[in-house]
Amino acid sequence: MNIMQPQNQTQKYDFLFSDIDSGIIKIPKFQRDFVWTKDQTARLIDSIIKGYPIGTFIFWQTQDELRHFKEIGNITLPSTPVGSTVKYVLDGQQRITSLYAVRKGAIFTVQGKEIDYKDICIDLEASVESEEPAVLVEQPEDKRYITVYDLLNNNLTTFISNYNVEEIEKIQVYKQRLTTYDFSTIMIIDYPLDIACDVFTRINTGGTELTLFEIIVAKTYDAVKDFDLSYKYDMLIDSKNNGKDLEDADFDTIPAQTVLQCVSACLQAQVKRRDILKISRDDFINIWPTVVDAIFLAVDWITSTLRVPVSELMPYNALLVPITYAFHKNDFEQLDPTQSVLLQQYFWWASLTNRFSSGVETKIEQDLHRMDDILAHKEPTYRGEEVKLTLEDLKFRWFSAGDAFCKAILCLYAYHQPKRFDTNGLVKIDNSWLKMVNSKNYHHFFPNAYLKNKGYAYWQSNSILNITMVDDFLNKRKIKARAPKDYLEEFKHKNKHFQETMNSHLICDPDNYGIWEDDYEKFLEERGKVVLQEIELRLNPEL
């Protein structure tokens, strides 16, 4: 790959800003918003008229069209002329925006307050050579001044009637110093997008790398086709009642990276970063609507067939990628019974083997071939990667809300649609409650505090088998640290469907689970047997 060396150039004020006026210079949208204050802008202008260095502007010249800022304050920036190359600002956004805002007299609205850059002015009573600042942020009542806006946008002849000879001389000096100042610029020409973004990262964000999503947002932007990936992703997550979205399905925590992998999988059966970066703008835009449809079908299948009610319970977000691919390749048709059973088997196998704890991209691509087998009614091979679980593995599995294996067991609990202990009503499972171990939805059936008083260490009480899913009111207000036999005895008398309720928590026979005897060990043993049996049914289904 041949990359031209950066070109060092100097440019005068008028030449630099005529490129903005003609639509040649643009600020890419992965830059931060304009955040400089008027004080900072005033100091910048003061440095220029004193001849101080103000740093270098770095531009990236390219034919690529990126998502960019279209306004500076109340000033609308022009479109780039057809056939022209664009110069994107990679370094110096705040400086160049400040200077342009003053030249145009831009007005910014910040927290409901208007900030007018026409007010920035030069104190004509100050000495031209003084070290004291000559540029003010507001027009003074007790001093002679000229606004920088007027200085740059009017001829000297227009000032004759308002200023004396000495002031005109100063105005002439200031105008000359501003308009003839040599701005240092570096031009990088025709760099690939990912390298240009790397340059931006190194010089702007202290080493914080631009995300792949930010790069693809910039790359796929198309004003003519009205395609802005950032907006499209926001609408996919939450359309604000303007169409179908993932928020309505309680799957609104799916990250942008996963959505990019879904697009790449459906388009080219590859999901590595380098492969996603190779996708052309047109190919990405054209396939986007069908991938969105496939994502919705995948989520519908996950929530209805697997009964995973919310995205926060998904063991891995990456699981959405092969499932989306399957529906996309299946021409958006529902899966037949055999395909559905095989896909369920895959879900549980991947979830219980910590499949995506490392090498995610490579493993997703391997699993896309498994999806091909499933669509062809062939059972994928899992040879050498079988799930091997024992009762002891479950009994001593430390519960962590972020652990994929634990999430898989929670999905198993959720599949049975757990009911409230007191009323047999469905437990409401909410994304916002599931991010921490102390979530309102997670309840230690034998409460930790109770077991601690019985001499159990926390590592013993915090078993995944001791977790049930309840509503926050029962958890925090009714159950607290009471022994199971105490709170269940109370609920048993209120709940006419008590046995149905307990079944929904995989506690199939309370009389034989050690509950009424406060026998924690027996509870883990009996519930563990049922959980193992449920897992076995899913990993080895009858086709």
Image (cartoon, helix red, strand yellow):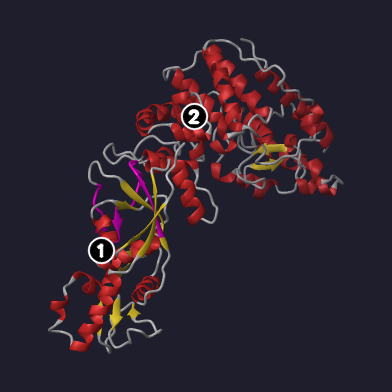
Tag on residue 14? 1
How crowded pointer 2 is (Cα within 10 Å; few <14, some 14-19, many 20+) is rated as many
**Residue at the (51%, 40%) spot, across then down:** 255
Residue 251, percent from left and from top? 50, 36
Quarter of the image that includes the C terminus: top right
Cα gap from disc 1 to disc 2, whole angstroms: 55 Å
Q: Secondary structure at mark 1?
A: helix
Residue 334, percent from left and from top? 46, 18
**Residue at the (41%, 42%) spot, across then down:** 217
Q: Amino acid at mark 2?
A: Val
Tell me, yes or no, whether the highlighted magenta stretch contains residue 75. yes
Nearest to the observer: residue 340 or residue 457: 340
**Residue at the (26%, 44%) spot, across then down:** 84
Left or right? Give the position of 108 relative to 413: left
Question: Start and end of the magenta stretch?
Answer: 57-80
The residue under label 2 is 299
**Residue at the (54%, 52%) spot, across then down:** 208
